[in-house]
Amino acid sequence: MTQEEPVSDALAPRFGLGPIGQVLIPVSDVDAATAWYRDVLGIRLLFAFPGMAFLDAGGVRLYLARPEEPGFGGPVTLYFRVPDIHAAVEELEARGVAFSGRPRMIFDDGAQQTWMCFSRDPDGNNVALMSEVPSGG
């Protein structure tokens, strides 16, 4: 009797998650939240139904809805990539967005720096800006 050879890793079926398709953002007032994400942040509204709205954040769908169960969801943290964090903060502050501090460098590996700055939407969900730039830039 021969022992069966294990299937090599190269031939084994692989499981892998795809990119994020949708993020639920729990809100207390869908219309007000839609206006904030659309008009203040400038995220494109895809479609809306009573009690829910869907926006396109660079290919990731944001789903705004009032939770059906108390305590379900939030708060969440959304990290939006921006090429120039200082310019993005300045623009959003001009639109009425308040940040908890100034942009700051979170990490520098010698080749690349990661900068972040944090705010909140009207329901207290965290909204962050992040910028990855060459070190020294």
Image (spheres, helix red, strand yellow):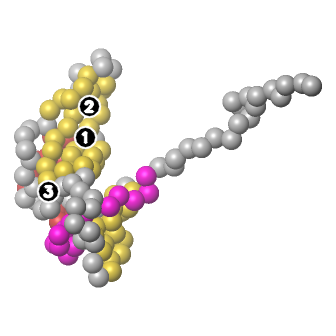
Report which residue position mark 1 lands on: 130
Report which residue position mark 2 lands on: 114
Residue 76 horizontal/vertical position (percent): 25, 52
Q: Residue furthest bottom?
A: 50
In front: mark 3 or mark 2?
Answer: 3
Label 2: state its secondary structure.
strand
Q: Distance from label 2 to label 1 (Cα)? A: 7 Å
CB under 8 Å between discs 3 and 2: no
Report which residue position mark 3 lands on: 124
Residue 8 horizontal/vertical position (percent): 74, 28
Residue 72 horizontal/vertical position (percent): 27, 62
Magenta segment includes 42:
no
Label 1: state its secondary structure.
strand
Label 3 Cα crowd, 10 Å radius (few <14 / some 14-19 / many 20+): some
Given the image, on which type of amino acid does mark 3 rest? Gly
Magenta residues, as a range? Answer: 20-33
**First along the sequence among labels 2 and 1:** 2
Query: Quadrant location of the C terminus?
Result: top left
**First along the sequence among labels 3 and 1:** 3
